[in-house]
Amino acid sequence: MVESKMVTEEVEVIHLWSSPRSLSTSLMYSFAQRDDTEVLDEPLYANYLQVTGEQRPYREELLSKLESDGNKVIQEIIFAPGEKTYRFCKHIASQRLPGLTSDLMKRGKHCILIRNPLDVLTSYDKVSPPSFGVLGYCSLVSIYNELCDQGKTPPVIDSDLLREDPEATLRGLCGDLGIPFQTAMLKWEPGPKPFDGMWAPYWYKNTHKSTGFELPKKYPSPFPSSLYNLLEQSLPLYNLLRCYVKGSSNGVQPELPVSTNEKLLVWVGDQIMPRESAKVSVFDSIVQGGDGVWEGLRIYNGKIFKLEEHLDRLFDSAKALAFSNVPTREQVKEAIFKTLIRNEMFNDAHIRLTLTRGKKVTSGMSPSFNQYGCTLIVLAEWKPPVYDNEKGIVLVTATTRRNSPNNLDSKIHHNNLLNNILAKIEGNNAHADDAIMLDKDGYVSETNATNIFLVKNGRVATPYSDYCLPGVTRATVVDLAVNENLVMVERRISLSEFHTADEVFTTGTMGELSPVLKVDGRTVGDGMVGPVTRRLQNAYTKLSSESGVPIPGYIHN
């Protein structure tokens, strides 16, 4: 009596999609150790060579021995009955060609393995010259999106994580695939395997020496400069997929204060980009030395409040810092308008407008290295006022003193904010909303982020703008106080006067008018929002809702 192998009616197929040289063979060896899984090594390879005409040393032998009709392979090999519960199919993404039956993607479970093209290209170049199509990063993105459209979002794993912590990565992958993890997956015997493709002698030499997933080398191999263009083309696609990897630092995203800001469009340089693509060069002066100027703008009812005043200060600051090749006022306005329109932001929005000295030809301090022109950034966000303007805020006094004009004039609205940031750290450590900063003589200048006012016996006072930024909102409030027939003065103000004031409030584009209820642990007035503060808040709200530069195309409802 002849015994026959048991053949199941149907096998659950697990499709692995990867680029070449991505540890896919090691992962195939790993799955082959399971007692419930059989494996296939690139079953669509012959079809790929037949259709594309790609040349390989083993091309003729492979085509003579393996089925090259892709749809036959899918129906008669990939989805054929088998002896095990699962069939693991290792696929190279570029081998998924047009004309293959949709069953390939619709049936079975799918996962994606990625590897940094820095490593793929270095490894691939040792065997044969790579091409963008063969690398398959574009195909991997297409496969990911197609599976997502089917409601079958595939797990994505990174080869570096697989090598650094194979058990955790494999447990996670098995969990995502809905199959039990087996510890046998962590080790295998060295040497060729009976299920290796006939191309193994050309590509699998290092894998045949392995007995498991090995840690990456501490230091990489030199990168071939001839492959630089391929790296530039492939790396953005790899990084896009890397965002979907569980357990990677790139894949863990903190919660945003306003969730709708997840899909922003940002102006950088001369174009609009998605939020995660909106970046400046590491050679930009803003990175090299905080060398830039900026403004904050608010949008109310389809209009940009005090736009002209903010642009005046932006261009004055750029001139004070001797920027060259500065965009025109009209160009800046157009970038602002286009960014707001693309994002459909016509109300309750804030813009961080930045102009850097631009990109350098080499790292260094000298502006003579800035030969590309300025970099313009328009970052528009959905952002309500950042302080609680109904209940009020708490301030403490920082030990960090505000910059003197002897060192860096605060009338230049520059991006080098370390002076303010150090004070903000003190405020955070004291669990306060912000920190008051004094000038070199001990008089109050401003807070780390806003201008500051006090009210005493109905008279409004604010410090001179010798050390502090002469804010646009500050000037607006000064004018409003005069229009409200309040006594308004600018003078040197000591800290004790703020401790004993009837009312204190701060001003700024980001927070508007914010009542201060405590300063250095001392209750301001009766601990409530004062009548003068409330009166000026109302006047400011009315003005901001009625004035401003209209956004083209906005239709007021």
Image (spheres, rainbow, N blue to C red):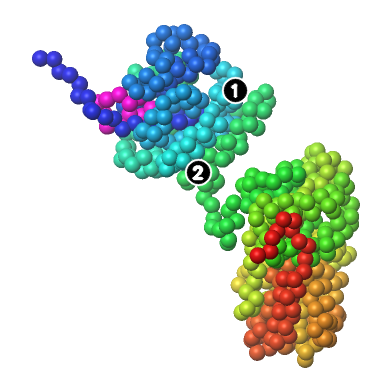
Q: Is residue 40 above or below residue 303?
A: above
In this view, the residue farthest toward the bottom is 457
Q: Quadrant for residue 309, please give it.
A: bottom right
Q: Which residues are magenta?
A: 78-89
Mark drawn on residue 131? 1
Is residue 350 found inside the magenta-colored segment of the image?
Answer: no
Q: CA distance from mark 1 to mark 2?
A: 25 Å
Mark drawn on residue 489? none
Q: How many marks?
A: 2
Q: Which residue is mark 2?
A: 244
- N-term-proximal mark, 1 vs 2: 1
Residue at screen point 23% across, 28% down: 9
Q: Is residue 523 visible?
A: yes
Residue at screen point 45% across, 17% down: 47
Q: Is residue 79 above or below residue 302?
A: above
Question: As drawn, is 214 to the left or to the right of 36?
Answer: right
Is residue 86 found inside the magenta-colored segment of the image?
Answer: yes
Q: Position of residue 190 (x, y in %)?
A: 38, 23
Q: Quadrant for residue 368, please give it.
A: top right
Residue at screen point 61% across, 79% down: 391
